[in-house]
Image: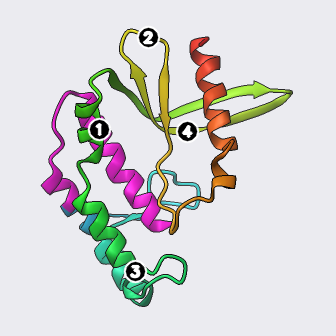
Amino acid sequence: LLLGTLIHHIEEKISLSLMEGKSPNYDELIDELYNVNIPKKNPFDTEGGIFGINILKERFTKDYFSPSDKTGLAYFNKVNRYVSNIKRQENYLLEHPELELVDVEHPFVFSYKGKTLKGFIDRIMKYKGQNRYQIYDIKTRDRLFDKKDITTPLQHVVYGLAIEEETGC
């Protein structure tokens, strides 16, 4: 969970930089990945609770270096894989010039069948000049999803409904 929060934090910074038309400073972002320390101010603080790899490595030394039973990879390996591929978001946009990054951590709230649904969409890209979107949810799961788990992912259905509610498409 803490690693996922950290990766979301770094990915959001990359997205915000790209949305401003800038190339992210990856050296600074990698340094932040290893050294950030933003404790929670209180139990309801949604901005805190972000700790860098160096802190997580101290807190969870055994887990950090021990291979997972599920994947055979240690968190050490996963972090190295993430760092070696940290430019993937920028590369994806270069490979897909028809897309533009339009929002990150996009808040939504809407009613569906008498229930209020709310949350945040990690990343939204739009096809330039069209009312078509790509929705991204950043996952740091310790193993690949089973096909049965992704056939109709409820989370993405909700995200799609949220975008439809906002844009009418």
Please, what is the three-letter code of the amino acid marked with disc 3?
Ala
Figure coloring:
rainbow
Q: Which mark is residue 120?
A: 4
Q: Closest to the observer: 15 or 126?
A: 126
Q: Is residue 65 visible?
A: yes
Which residue is pictured at 60% across the width and 30% down the height? 108
**For the residues marked 1 and 2, what is the alpha-carbon distance in whole angstroms?**
19 Å
Quadrant assignment, res 32: bottom left
Distance of mark 1 from mark 3, alpha carbons? 27 Å
The segment highlighted magenta reads 1-30
Crowd tier of the residue under label 4, counting other residues whose Cα lies within 10 Å: few below 14, some 14–19, many 20 or above: some
- Whether residues under marks 2 and 3 lie with C-beta atoms below 8 angstroms apart, the answer is no
Of all residues, the one furthest to the front in this rendering is 147
Along the polypeptide, which appears first: circle 2 or circle 3?
3
Give the amino acid at mark 2.
Gln
Q: Residue at x 58, y 55 (%)?
A: 44
The location of residue 60, given as percent across then percent down, is 43, 84
| Quadrant the C terminus occupies | top right
Front one among 29 and 68? 68
Find the distance from the CA under tag 4 to the CA under tag 3: 29 Å
Asked where in the image residue 17 lies, by quadrant, the reply is top left
Q: Tell which tag, 4 or 2, sits nearer the viewer.
A: 2
Q: Position of residue 28 (x, y in %)?
A: 16, 55
Question: Residue 130 has which mark?
Answer: 2
The residue identified by callout 1 is 92
- The residue to which callout 3 is attached is 74
Q: Who comes first in sequence, dot 1 or dot 4? A: 1
